[in-house]
Image (tube, rainbow, N blue to C red):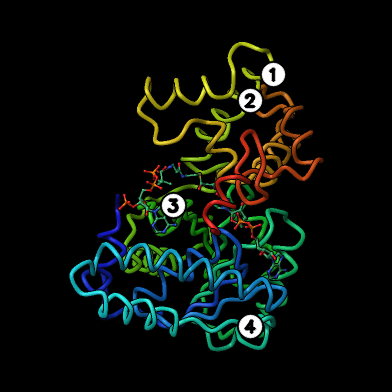
Amino acid sequence: MATSMFLQPARFFSKKAGINHVLVIGGGLMGSGIAQVTAAAGMKVTLVDQSQDILKKSLTGIEQSLNKIASKKFADDPQKGKEFVKNTVCQIETVTDPEQNARHADLIVEAIVERMEPKQALFSKLDKVAANHTIFASNTSSLSISEIACATKRKDRFGGLHFFSPVPMMKLVEVVRIAETSDDTFNQLADFSKRVGKVPVACKDTPGFIVNRLLVPYMMEAVRMLERGDAKAEDIDTAMKLGAGYPMGPLELADFVGLDVCKMIIDGWHKGDPNQPLFSPVKTLDKLVTEGKLGRKSGQGFFDYKAAQQAKKK
Ligand code: CAA
Ligand code: NAD
């Protein structure tokens, strides 16, 4: 798969780029990945989450991912591979207080829970302490960047930086500009995306940008198909993998993204556009989330991952 881009940061390094220290907020699935690729590109990273316990898990996940990459890239020289992993992890410090660390960052990337209020509250606090030149970016999947940016007085230095999961493997970043985003900010965000080995595309601040506007309704249609009893979960996924060439079926992909994240996206869009049938709430999704079945991260979603996860631990 696409490991080579991740391992060639120097090629993308822009000498003029002003981003050397990145504060990543949220050490979950996405924040960990963003921290990893940023550190591997040689930038200093401060990773923030609510507790050191969570951050410990984030670092373990980052190390596992780096080990996978190193075992391929440095197959002939395991010592070099170990150094690559160690040096990359050393570029990442973990903290629980974003405000104390914001003033040193050139770029702040937020990857916390997919809700407007916590995102606005966070950026509002950071706006008061961050340096004047610091660019703010949100990795939101579905919320309005413009609305998040309203919590700050730096709309010209605000944009969306939408990575895809798993971050070390997926090559795309959607760079979202709002009306006030300056050309310099947009260019710096696009340049940063290239430095971390990704391909940036420019997006307007519309619900779901490009990918999720197409992908999320597709996944939700698959759940509705399952609810109608048109096909079994396994068959829906096999059909889309073998019949359409997708690497994962829609239900496995929903589990992979996180059913809580999928629910927050579709519920938010439904609130904004209740007449759009593609955005209508999905009963099975609601039920699974209520039961704590959040997909791969909780061990159970449309499919059961517990056995595979336990086998991996042994
Ligand atoms: N870190 C490092 N390496 C990883 C990795 C990670 N996190 N995940 C997978 N890999 C590597 C594996 O080690 C493996 O390497 P080899 O081929 O050298 O053995 C390779 O990637 C392939 O992995 P697997 O064999 O385990 O499985 P796969 O071939 O199915 O690939 C996948 C895994 C890349 C995730 C692929 O299934 C895929 O592309 N799935 C679709 C992902 C997708 O659509 N993502 C977008 C989700 S939507 C989103 O993110 C936006 C949003 O806002 C919700
Ligand atoms: P996640 O649940 O895996 O991680 C979120 C992390 O944020 C958790 O570790 C949580 O403890 C932490 N957090 C919550 N509030 C915080 C706060 N105020 N300060 C510091 N940390 C806080 O979620 P995720 O899947 O990584 O998603 C994060 C963001 O990225 C969301 O906006 C989501 O929509 C977006 N996104 C998700 C995916 C995906 O495939 N899951 C893809 C692209 C974008």
**Are discs 3 and 2 less than 8 Å apart at CB?**
no
| Neighbourhood count class around disc 2 (C-alpha, 10 Å): few under 14, some 14–19, many 20 upward | many
Under circle 1, the secondary element is helix
Real-space Cα separation, disc 2 to disc 4, in angstroms: 39 Å
In this rendered view, identify the residue nearer to me: 215 or 237: 237
**Are discs 1 and 2 less than 8 Å apart at CB?**
yes
Q: Is residue 13 left or right of residue 253?
A: left
Under circle 4, the secondary element is strand
Real-space Cα separation, disc 4 to disc 1, in angstroms: 43 Å
Which amino acid lies under the numbered mark 1 shown in the image of this protein?
A: Glu
Which label was assigned to residue 223? 2
N-term mark: 3 or 4: 4
Residue pictured at 67% horizontal, 42% vertical = 300
Q: Is residue 66 left or right of residue 304?
A: left
Residue position marked by numbered label 3 in the rendering? 174
Would you say the beta carbon of the disc 4 residue lies within 8 angstroms of ligand 2?
Answer: no
Instruction: Specify the quadrant that holds the C terminus.
Output: bottom right
| Neighbourhood count class around disc 4 (C-alpha, 10 Å): few under 14, some 14–19, many 20 upward | some
Give the x, y percent position of residue 228. 68, 13
Give the x, y percent position of residue 111. 60, 62
Give the x, y percent position of residue 16. 28, 80
In this rendered view, identify the residue nearer to me: 251 or 161: 251
Residue position marked by numbered label 1 in the rendering? 227
Real-space Cα separation, disc 3 to disc 4, in angstroms: 27 Å
Residue position marked by numbered label 4 in the rendering? 95
Which amino acid lies under the numbered mark 4 shown in the image of this protein?
A: Val
Q: Nearer the viewer, mark 3 or mark 4?
A: 4
Corner quadrant of residue 126? bottom right
N-term mark: 2 or 4: 4
Residue pictured at 77% horizontal, 59% vertical = 117
Which amino acid lies under the numbered mark 2 shown in the image of this protein?
A: Val
Real-space Cα separation, disc 3 to disc 2, in angstroms: 26 Å
